[in-house]
Image: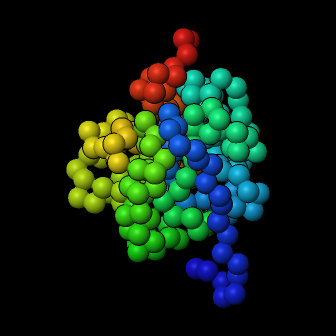
Amino acid sequence: MPVANAPILSLCDRVAPDLDILFVGINPSLRSAEVGHHFASKGNPFWRLLHASGLTAELHAPEDDVALPARGLGITNVCSRATRSAAELGRDELREGGRALPDRVAALRPRIVALVGVSLYPHVFPGGRETGPGAKRARLAGARVFVLPNPSGLNQAYPGFQVKLVWFRRLARLAGRARSA
């Protein structure tokens, strides 16, 4: 629950037109908003997953998020308000963010939109029947859609690095960025 008169923390998008992949998270963590970089919580393996899957040639740190658009990758969120847990977001915030996303995607024209978190799909595609991670038949403003498990250490549905890595590797193959093992 927000504290009265507390500042609302948010985080800048890291985007550019014509990206290969636009990663769309639920919302930033408090830690990410405090330091000004995406996926900055110590327990979040997002950056290791990008590298291990072949989506990036080098292992990046959260501070490197500003350079991602030059590498064809971008990051945004459905909700800009930072919270300790996505469970703190209101249903209206998620619905509004999901409704606004197609216009943002249309303006950026990425090839692939990667929804970071299985729970995002119904907010972006209300009434959509495709559940779980993986490539979806649905398109968002012309972009292919791929759903990733949330990389957060708080994600109990897809626990462990290797379980999440399977889905990041599938995204890398879809994007034509997979490295030979």
Image location (x, y in percent) of residue 108: 48, 47
Q: Position of residue 158 (x, y in %)?
A: 46, 42
148 sits left or right of 34 in the view: left
User: Depth check: 84 or 22 in front?
Assistant: 22
Position of residue 84 relative to residue 142, above or below, is: below
- Write down the quadrant of residue 145 in the picture: top left
Seen as rendered, the residue at the extreme top is 180
Q: Is residue 30 left or right of residue 15?
A: right
Structure colour scheme:
rainbow
Residue 54 located left or right of residue 11: left
Can you give x and y, in whole percent of width and height, for residue 52 in the image? 60, 26
> Is any part of residue 128 visible from this angle?
yes
Q: How many marks?
A: 0
Identify the residue at image location x=65%, y=60%.
Answer: 11
Asked whether, in this view, residue 140 is left or right of residue 60, the answer is: left
Q: In which quarter of the image is the N terminus?
A: bottom right
Query: Can residue 153 be seen at all in this image of the molecule?
Result: no
Q: Which residue lies furthest to the bottom in this view?
A: 4
Residue 115 vs 89, above or below: the answer is above
- Residue at 61%, 59% in the rendered image: 28
Residue, x 44% and y 43% (percent of image)? 109
Position of residue 124 relative to residue 147, above or below, is: below
Q: Which residue is drawn at 45% across and 31% down?
A: 171
Which is nearer the eye, 93 or 14? 14
In this view, the residue in front, 156 or 99, is 99
* Quarter that holds the C terminus: top right
Q: Where is residue 146 in the image (x, y as percent from the top left)?
A: 39, 39
